[in-house]
Image (spheres, helix red, strand yellow):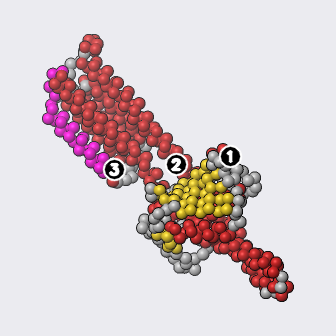
Amino acid sequence: MQAPSRKAENTADDLHPVVGRASGIREANSQDSTGLRNMQQLIQLRWIAVVGQVVTILVVHFGLGIALPLATMSAVLASLVAFNLGSQLWWRRHGPVTNNALLVALIVDVASLAFQLHLSGGITNPFVFLFLLQVALSTVLLRPPASWIVALATVLCVIGLIVVPAPLRLSVDPSRGFADHYVQGLLICFALVVSLFVVFITRIARILRDRDARLAEMRQRAAEEDHIVRIGLLASGAAHELGTPLSTLSVILGDWHHLPTFASDPELSQDVSEMQAQVMRCKSIVTNILLAAGETRGEAPVETTLHDLFDDLADEWRTSRHVGHFHYRMKCADNPRIVSDAGLRQMVFNVLDNAVEVSPDWVAFDVDCREGALVIEVSDAGPGFSPDVLGRLGVPYNSTKGRPGGGLGLFLSVNVARTLGGRLAARNRPQGGAIVTMTLPMSAIAIDAIAIEVPDHDD
């Protein structure tokens, strides 16, 4: 037995350049999105702070008649607005958002708040408790020691407000109750901090939960891909083992076909021809297994058109399977140039094989293009999926067929669709049977959207 190729130890992404490119981009985007969403929350909170400061300055200066240094406070506000605009434009085009970037953003917020408090009463300003919001945000958003840096910065700012004389001193007399401006400001500050805590901590917690869910999904995918690799190693070894006996059978059947005994009996001759056709089909399957495992060298991706790919695929499947009625419909008006990917072909074949196994009398195969996506639907008239199978779609060995290895075809198809940036879904038909829908972004296989990588011609 020939040992399985070391290339079969690679992941599915390494075996297919197009698949690997889509999977890598999707994984990178998943990792970057959490930091970007957190930064967007800080930017939104900063706009709220700017509006709140403007309203507070106007009310205090003109409503309460407390003279504030409007020019200096306006300069601080203008700087904060400029920083927020720059942040919004920068992070819309660049990434990823790192822990240090979030730290800098929070330090800027702490510094601007400290300047405004210093200019409007210092430690006697009731809004000094807004520092607690910055500490809470840093605790949720940042990893130590960055969160401790923000906490230390707020403590130093409060000490500075105590030590450095403010240009304006506010009268504080809590004994007057609600009539005292300090008590009024303290109540407003408390309500504001509580409201912002609930709103933004809830949002950030949801973002972090989404991140944890994505990480759990990625770990699950890694485990599934490891399972696929082990299946590939087994299939590659089995393909090498089957190659020799299949070749021997092909030679023997060819010799039988020319023997007078078989040539003179049309029925025997037809049986031998059918056996030869089935052996050739088995050899083709073995070749495809070795190709998927990286054993076939020096073959570049094949360029074709969308219609030609699926027309040929439907004809090949129809002639090699026994099905009563096979309805194939190509609904795509456009016919773009695409890459004929072996994984895509095998995915469709797996789903069609599952359909004909439960519905040998009728299978429908529809290909449509909708809003930049390729939608492939396979319908059958079988018993349909049980709720348990639908709930665990794509899990290895999730099958109602009750035989060893059942469910692997659909499991592999789900992973091929996923690595191409798409998805596979299933549902039961109201009139009986099931529909399996494979949705792929056209950009994953279109020639204009990807660069075809030609394998090295070594070995």
Specify which label sits upstream in the sequence, 1 or 3: 3
Q: Quadrant of the N terminus?
A: bottom right
Amino acid type of disc 3?
Answer: Trp
In the picture provided, is 197 more to the left or to the right than 441? left
Specify which label sits upstream in the sequence, 1 or 2: 2
Distance, label 1 to label 2, CA atoms, is 29 Å
- Residue at x 42%, y 49% (from the top left corner): 33
Task: Check disc 3 and report the residue beneath it.
Answer: 91
Q: Nearer the viewer, residue 401 or 104?
A: 401
Distance, label 1 to label 3, CA atoms, is 46 Å
Task: Check disc 2 and report the residue beneath it.
Answer: 215
Q: Nearer the viewer, residue 290 or 422?
A: 422
Asked if the residue under mark 3 is in contact with the one under mark 2, i.e. CB atoms within 8 Å, the reply is: no
Nearest-to-viewer mark from 1 and 3: 1
Q: Which mark is residue 386?
A: 1
Q: Where's residue 310, x and y in %?
A: 56, 67
| SS state under label 2 | helix
Q: Is disc 3 surrounded by few (<14), some (14 to 19) or many (20+) residues within 10 Å?
A: some
| Vertical placement of residue 211 versus 70, above or below | below
Distance, label 2 to label 3, CA atoms, is 23 Å
- Residue at x 50%, y 67% (from the top left corner): 306
Amino acid type of disc 1?
Answer: Ser
Magenta-colored segment: predominant secondary structure: helix
Q: Where's residue 45, x and y in %?
A: 33, 37
Amino acid type of disc 2?
Answer: Leu
- Residue at x 57%, y 80% (from the top left corner): 459
In the picture provided, is 181 more to the left or to the right than 12? left
Specify which label sits upstream in the sequence, 2 or 3: 3
Q: Is residue 74 magenta?
A: yes
Q: Nearer the viewer, residue 340 or 53?
A: 340
Q: Is disc 1 surrounded by few (<14), some (14 to 19) or many (20+) residues within 10 Å?
A: few
Q: Is residue 317 magenta?
A: no
